[in-house]
Image (cartoon, grey):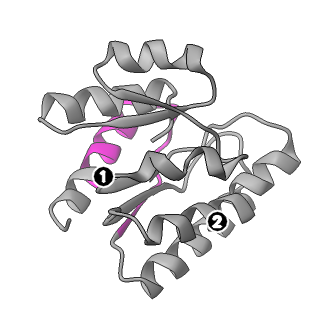
Amino acid sequence: MGGGCRGRLLAERAIAAGHAVRITTRTADGGHAIEAVGAESWVGTPMRLATLRGSLDGVAVACWLLGTATAPAAELAELFGPRLELFMTQAIDTTVRGVVYEAGGANASAQMLAGGEAIVRTLTTRNAIPVSFLAADPRNDAVWLAAARAAVASLLSCA
């Protein structure tokens, strides 16, 4: 789960429901806000996938919530292409039993988001891992949060 504001909102609700939550952040400084909501902070970045390997230990549902990621276009293309594909192949050999993929966003192009969705759909189908595609507008916190909570809950009922 990404450590941005929306990720922390989702984490607060999941923690209140009795779930343990681990959120990744690119820097140790980002961990303070994550820990303030009661989640475990993990320093790592999809641009250096080795930093995320241990983040999946004991995780039932992995969330790729990067629809509002900000980066140069080439880096965004990497996040929704090769980096996502490598992350998904790593997730297969872990405890992950469900994936939420944010298929909507403000910064990634529709083509990038669709390409990422195709990667996730292919790998989850091939490996019989339930998936939920989150298409809610990330600019509307209330609508996004309700959709994200529903996506995670549907996967936890399968896990």
Height in image: 120 above or below 29? below
Q: Which residue is mark 2?
A: 86
Circle 1 SS class: loop
Residue 58 in picture, x, y percent from top left: 30, 52
Q: Mark 1 is on which residue type?
A: Gly
Q: Is residue 77 visible to us here? A: yes
Q: Is residue 81 visible to us here? A: no
Q: Mark 2 is on which residue type?
A: Leu
Q: Residue at x 36, y 75 (%)?
A: 129
Give the quarter of the image for residue 85. Answer: bottom right
Q: Which residue is mark 1?
A: 58
Give the quarter of the image for residue 27. Answer: top right
Q: How many marks?
A: 2
Q: Is residue 86 magenta?
A: no
Height in image: 23 above or below 53? above
Residue 78 or residue 93, whichever sits in front: 93
Q: Which residues are magenta?
A: 131-151
Q: Are marks 2 and 1 in contact (CB under 8 Å)?
A: no
Residue 60 or residue 13, whichever sits in front: 60
Quarter of the image containing the C terminus?
Answer: bottom left
